[in-house]
Image (tube, grey):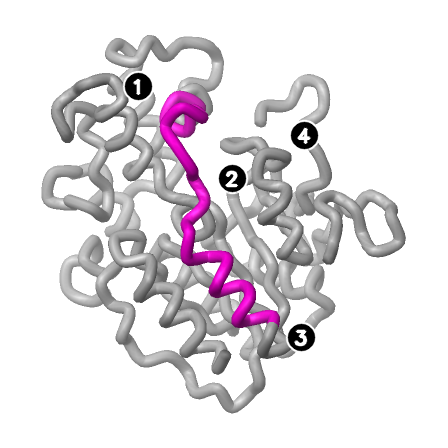
Amino acid sequence: MPTLGRDRSGAVAVVTAASPGLGTTEAVVSDPGPGDSVGRGPPWRWWGALGRELPSRAVRTDTVMFDVGGVVIVTPFEMAARLEHHRGWAAGTLGLFGPFDPDRDPDWRLLCAGELDEDGYWQRQAERLAPMLGIDGDDPTLRLIEILFAPEHGEIVRPEVRGCISALHAAGIRTAVLSNHLHRFHQPHLLERLLARFDPIIDLSYAQVRKPDPRAFEAALVRLGSPDPAAVIHVDDQPAHVAGAEKAGLRAVSFDPTDPAASFAAVLEAAGA
C-alpha cells in the first residue's frame, strides 16, 4: 500500500508536468509549506445521464482515476445542508443547491453551461455568504470551504467509495486521484488513510493548467506511466471535466452526487470490475 506523499523508494514525489506550457503538476506530498493555503438537454440535468453510452472496452482498463471533491468526498452542497441543520437554520437558508436543485441555483446553471468556471462559482458564493457566515480575509473561497467542512458537520468520505476501490483492486485495476483543489481546499492528512489506497495522487491546486484542459489529463497520463489513454477511466462530477478527459482520449464516467450508489456501480461497470 503506498504511503501518502512518498514514492516507492521513500523519496518525496513532486513534479509530474510534461506537456508544453503546463505549469507545475504536483502529487500531494504533505501539508502546504509556509505561505501556502491549503449536452444532453439542459446541461445542468446532465448529472442524471449515468446510462449514457461509454466507449467500448476494447482495451483492458489499467487505471481508474478519481476526482476527490464530490466523488471521493461529499460535495459542499451536502455539507451546506448539514451546516444549516447544525445551526438550526431552515433548509436552503444558504442558497447552496448545485446539482441537488439546479432550478434554484442560477450560478450553478451558468457553470454547467460553461459560462462560469468552478473557481468563479465558489468565489461568487463566498462573496454572497460573507455577511451571513462572517467570512473575511484574503481568500474568502477557502474560508467558505473550511466553514462548510468543519469537523462537527460529520464524516465527509462517501461510504460507497471503499467498496468500489476494493472491487477495482481485486480486478487488478489501479486507482489514482486527479484533483484540481485537493491541497487548496482540504487537509490531505485528514484523508490519509483513504488516500493511501490511491497511487499516484495528482493535485493541480497550484498548477497553471487544470481540468478541464486536456493538457492536465495528458500530464496525468505521463505520471501514470503513459498507458493507452483508452485504458484509463476518469471519474468526475463536473461535466466539463468529463468532456476534457474524453478530449484527451480517456474514457470517463459522469458521477452523479445525487445518486452515489448508482454512480459507483457505473464506475465498476465501465471498468469491467
Q: Secondary structure at mark 3?
A: loop
Q: Which residue is mark 1?
A: 127
- Which of 91 and 12 lies nearest the eye of the viewer? 91
Question: Which-is-in-front pick, marks 2 and 4?
Answer: 4
10 Å crowding of disc 1: few (<14), some (14-19), many (20+): some
Q: Which quadrant of the structure image shows residue 269? A: bottom left
Q: Which residue is mark 4?
A: 31
Q: Which residues are magenta?
A: 146-169
Rounded to the nearest angstrom, the CA distance separating label 1 from label 2 is 19 Å
Residue 67 is situated, as x and y percent measured from the top left of the image, at: 49, 53
Residue 183 is situated, as x and y percent measured from the top left of the image, at: 58, 35
Question: Can you say whether 239 is above or below 179 in the image?
Answer: below
Give whichever of discs 1 and 4 has the lower sequence position.
Answer: 4
Query: Magenta stretch containing residue 201, yes or no?
Result: no
Q: Secondary structure at mark 4?
A: loop
In this picture, residue 14 sits left or right of residue 71: right
- Which of 85 and 48 lies nearest the eye of the viewer? 85
Q: Which residue is mark 3?
A: 227
Residue type for callout 1: Glu
